[in-house]
Image: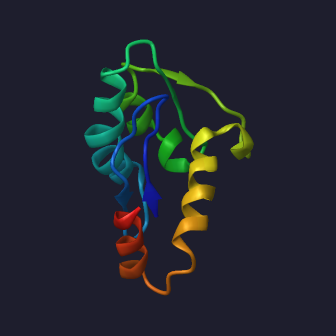
Amino acid sequence: MVCGVIAYNTRSLLVLIRGTITAQRYVHDILRPHALPLMQRLPGAIFQQAKARPHTARVSQDCLCTVIALPLPAQSSDLSPIEHTWDCLGQRVGHPTSLNELEAWLWQI
């Protein structure tokens, strides 16, 4: 899984997660090191995420208690700006045959 955080004029690093993403991994690997620091630099920013289980778990919600979050209905990827970013990246990356190849492509972009 590849995760990232985007904002109007900035972004986080891309994070490659190998294996299953749990709520604890989401908090430890995405929210605390990437999403929250970015949000703290953007006063008034609104955080948006999908309704995947790691996003809606209590530990994740507790971690986000200091930011404004936009509630989204399930299956609303058309309302998520980052989905358009993933589409563009997918077109540039092509069809990697391994995780290592995908990671190498992502770091070149």
Task: In this rendered view, identify the residue nearer to me: 13 or 2.
Answer: 13
Q: Nearer the viewer, residue 84 or 26?
A: 84
Asked where in the image residue 40 lies, by quadrant, the reply is top left
Q: Position of residue 44 (x, y in %)?
A: 44, 12
Q: Residue at x 37, y 70 (%)?
A: 18
Q: Which residue corresponds to the image point at 49% horizontal and 28% vertical from the top-left? A: 8
Quarter of the image with the C terminus in it: bottom left
Q: Is residue 90 left or right of residue 99?
A: right
Q: Quadrant of residue 11?
A: top left
- Above or below, 14 relative to 10: below
Work out which residue is located at the far bottom of the displayed protein and give it.
Answer: 97
Residue 39 % position (x, y): 37, 26
In the image, residue 1 lies at what x, y percent? 46, 64
Residue 64 quadrant: top left
- Residue at 63 percent across and 57 percent down: it is 87
Measured from the top left, where is residue 34 in percent x and y? 31, 41
Q: How is the image coloured?
A: rainbow
- In the depicted structure, whether residue 88 falls above or below residue 92: above
Work out whether residue 65 or residue 10 is closer to the camera in this orientation and state it.
Answer: 10
Q: Nearer the viewer, residue 20 or 102?
A: 102
Q: Is residue 63 above or below residue 97?
A: above
Classify residue 50 as left or right of residue 47.
right
Please, which residue is most extreme toward the top here? Answer: 44
Number of marks drawn: 0
